[in-house]
Amino acid sequence: MATLFERIIAREIPADIVYEDDLSLAFRDINPQAPVHLLVIPKKPLPQVEQMTEADKPLLGHLLWVANQVAAQQGLTNGYRLVVNNGNDGGQTVYHLHVHLLGGRFMGWPPG
């Protein structure tokens, strides 16, 4: 069964997409935790960080590059936070690797 994110990639479910290329997609989170809260996802189905292989290294670097480009596009000139949750204890709820891009306010530490 396709994940929520695979269905967004296939355009079966609408999303507010702000960036797309051959490898990735970035869209607004439907439950934002900051004034700017976007998700950057690979188009390749990759359930979580711990399941990546050495062949996925360029893809993971690409996702960080896209996050940086989208942050600039969104005007996050004063900084932003990138978060990748892995597994249940890491807070992962959709098992399709994704990078949260959060910004537009001060991010406290520790994150929670």
Image (cartoon, helix red, strand yellow):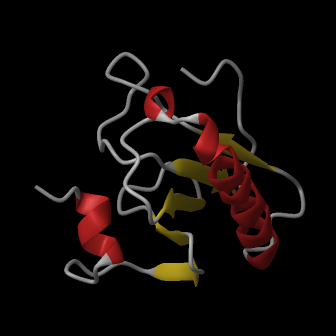
Residue 18 lies in what quarter of the image? bottom right
70, 53: nearer the viewer: 53
In-image side of 7 versus 100 (left or right)? left
Residue 19 lies in what quarter of the image? bottom right
Q: State the count of labels.
A: 0
61, 4: nearer the viewer: 61
Question: Residue sitting at 49 percent across and 49 percent down?
Answer: 98
Outermost residue, front side: 55
Where 19 falls versus 3 (above or below)? below
Question: Residue sitting at 36 percent across and 41 percent down?
Answer: 47
Outermost residue, right side: 77
Question: Residue sitting at 71 percent across and 22 percent down?
Answer: 109
Residue 73 lies in what quarter of the image? bottom right
Residue 5 image position (x, y, % from top left) = 32, 62
Residue 15 image position (x, y, % from top left) = 35, 78
Question: Residue sitting at 72 percent across and 53 percent down?
Answer: 64
Residue 97 image position (x, y, % from top left) = 45, 46
1, 102: nearer the viewer: 1
In-image side of 99 versus 91 (left or right)? right
Where 21 falls versus 95 (above or below)? below
Residue 40 image position (x, y, % from top left) = 55, 60
In-image side of 28 versus 7 (left or right)? right
